[in-house]
Amino acid sequence: MDRDSVGRVERVPHGSEPNASGIDFSANINPKTPPSVQAVYESAFEDSKAYPSDTAPGYRLAASEYVDVEPGQIVPTPGGLAAVRLALSVTVGPGDTVLVPSPSFGEYAREVRLQGAEPEFVPHDELLETDPDSHALAIVCNPNNPTGEAADPDALRDFVERSQAGDTTVLVDEAFLGFSEKPTIAGTEGVIVARSLTKLFGLPGLRAGFAVAKGDLLERLDRARITWNIGVPAMQVGAQAMRASEFIQETRERVSRERGQMRARLESRFSVHESDAPFLLLEVDGSVTELLERAREREVILRDARTFRGLDSHVRVAVRRPSENRRLEEVLERV
């Protein structure tokens, strides 16, 4: 991290209002958690009285099976954003430029600037067609947040090959990929993948995630990570969650089904972006502020998407339980 840049970098807004009165559609988090993870969390208490294993073999193994790579290619991190920061810390320095999708997750540009580098914003749906040469890093959000669409696998691999030829590392944030059947690019040369257990498993407070890399990138990530960087509860609960195959499949099916139904109903009122993720981006014809306030009066909390770079008339809504989604549809059809 570049000490001269820290004082110039602001924090960025996010969704989620855990103490709000109503149904929170502002954060893209699964409202369900895998069965048995609570018991695993409670049983981790005794093991937490000692330092966690610095190599986290059980967690690495579960993560490797989850994304189908070798255990040695896994670098545990306390959340997906920690994997993003770690990746930037070993690939980017002062004076570098980084290709950043827009609109997309606001933390990318912030983390780039914290390293003393400069984000070069590219429309999210044009990034894979951009020339990566002369950039230290290119960031791909797959599926993209807040728009929701997943990258074409062939186009992504072609972009990675062109990036390798120009000595540009590609960081692919797959925080929402687990909600879909789309293939991961984890284990590909020249790529760092960041994964999060926050979204799919409904455990944002656990702070568990990991990075995946090969070769020199892997060695640098593993050398640079903080010692004991993931705690015992996160390791044990995370391993249990990643092996909950029935839960994962049920979640994928529910989200796909519910997202389609929500889109069909909301299209009469809004322009709805195509999505492969557990959320929908809605373009509002009218006052976004008024829509947010009127929905809140009816105890439905939406994400103000105007905080994303380049959006000035949008809200984002998460896909939640069927009964909650019907309530959202009912409210948005009337406000």
Image: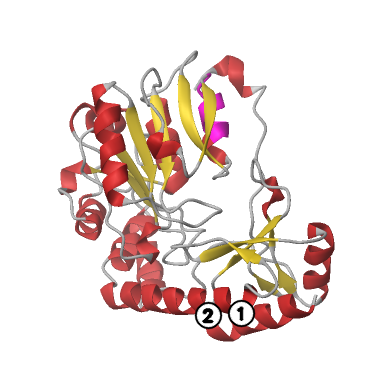
Q: What secondary structure is marked by label 1?
A: helix
Q: Main secondary structure of the magenta part?
A: helix
Q: Position of residue 170 (x, y in %)?
A: 34, 34
**Tags 1 and 2 touching, CB below 8 Å:** yes
Please indicate whether residue 177 sits to the left or right of residue 270 in the image: left
Q: Residue at x 42, y 29 (%)?
A: 88
Taking the magenta stretch, the answer to whether it contains residue 269 is no
Pick the front one: 54 or 266 = 266
User: Residue 312: image x %, image y %?
Assistant: 73, 48
* Residue at the image position 56 percent from the left and 73 percent from the top: 263
Which kind of residue does numbered mark 1 sit on? Arg
Q: Which region shows up in magenta?
A: 109-116
Q: Position of residue 269 (x, y in %)?
A: 70, 72
What numbered label is drawn on residue 265? Answer: 1
> What residue is pinned by disc 2?
261
Q: Nearer the viewer, residue 207 or 185?
A: 185
Residue 240: image quadrant is: bottom left
